[in-house]
Image: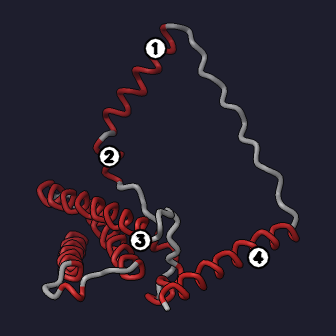
Amino acid sequence: MANVTFDIQWREAMMELLDQLEAENPEDTSLAPRDLAEYSCIYIKYLQIFKKLEECYDQLVHPQKRLDIKRALEGTIGRILEIKSWMVKLNNGNDCVQLDDILVDLKLTPDVLEIPTPRYYVEDRAKELDDRSKFLDALVEKYNVRRPQEPPILLPPALPEEEAIRVIQVNERGRQGRERARIMCEI
């Protein structure tokens, strides 16, 4: 029965992909996305589709279906990267795009923005990674080389509460100033 569930989820994800493509390239060019907010909504939608497809790929056993889902998954990953690139350009080259307002508008939680590593990356390369590990172990034994000790990671001391509050306030004032400047430019 679970197979039917993931078939349905796969169909839903593919329908959502088609809807996204229609929304991005409408027949009326005046409806096409132009600003950062519109691209941010599209980006979030693609992330949701990606997670659905990734779960379907992981749960389905049928090899032909897995190949089709993998192709759709890789296309979705590529599209996510393209949209992220457009978002960075629209954000004046700043990689950190603020999506919290859009998440609130869409009534979503921040965990929607987490991009998991596709499980097939590790699964498809499991034998290769295992062989590499065995080869490296054999080389270490053959040449009597000790593995280098990794230096312990030293964490910076914690900020005092007052200084942490000050840093947060400075950043918030800067964000508000940028927002005001953006609004003034639009006027």
Q: Residue 41: where, in percent of width, then height?
A: 38, 80
Of all residues, the one furthest to the top in this rendering is 143
Q: Which residue corresponds to mark 1?
A: 139
Q: Residue 99: where, in percent of width, then height?
A: 49, 77
Q: Which residue corresponds to mark 4?
A: 169
**Residue 147 horizontal side relative to residue 54, left or right:** right
Q: Which residue corresponds to mark 3?
A: 90
Residue at figure coordinates x 16%, y 55% from the top left: 67
Residue at figure coordinates x 18%, y 57% from the top left: 71
Closer to us: 186 or 155: 186
Type of the residue with mark 2: Glu
Type of the residue with mark 4: Gln
Kind of element beneath mark 1? helix
Residue 4, visible in the rendered structure: no
Type of the residue with mark 3: Leu
The quarter of the rendered structure image containing the N terminus is bottom left
Mark seen at residue 123: 2
Closer to us: 150 or 34: 34
User: Tag 1 or tag 2, which sits nearer the N-term?
Assistant: 2
Vertical position of residue 93 compared to residue 28: above or below: above
Kind of element beneath mark 4? helix
Vertical position of residue 29 compared to residue 78: above or below: below
User: Tag 3 or tag 2, which sits nearer the N-term?
Assistant: 3
**Residue 38 horizontal side relative to residue 56, left or right:** right
Mark seen at residue 153: none
Q: Residue 174: where, in percent of width, then height?
A: 68, 75
Q: How crowded is mark 2: few (under 14 residues within 10 Å), some or many (20 or more)?
A: few
Point out the frontmost of discs 4 and 2: 4
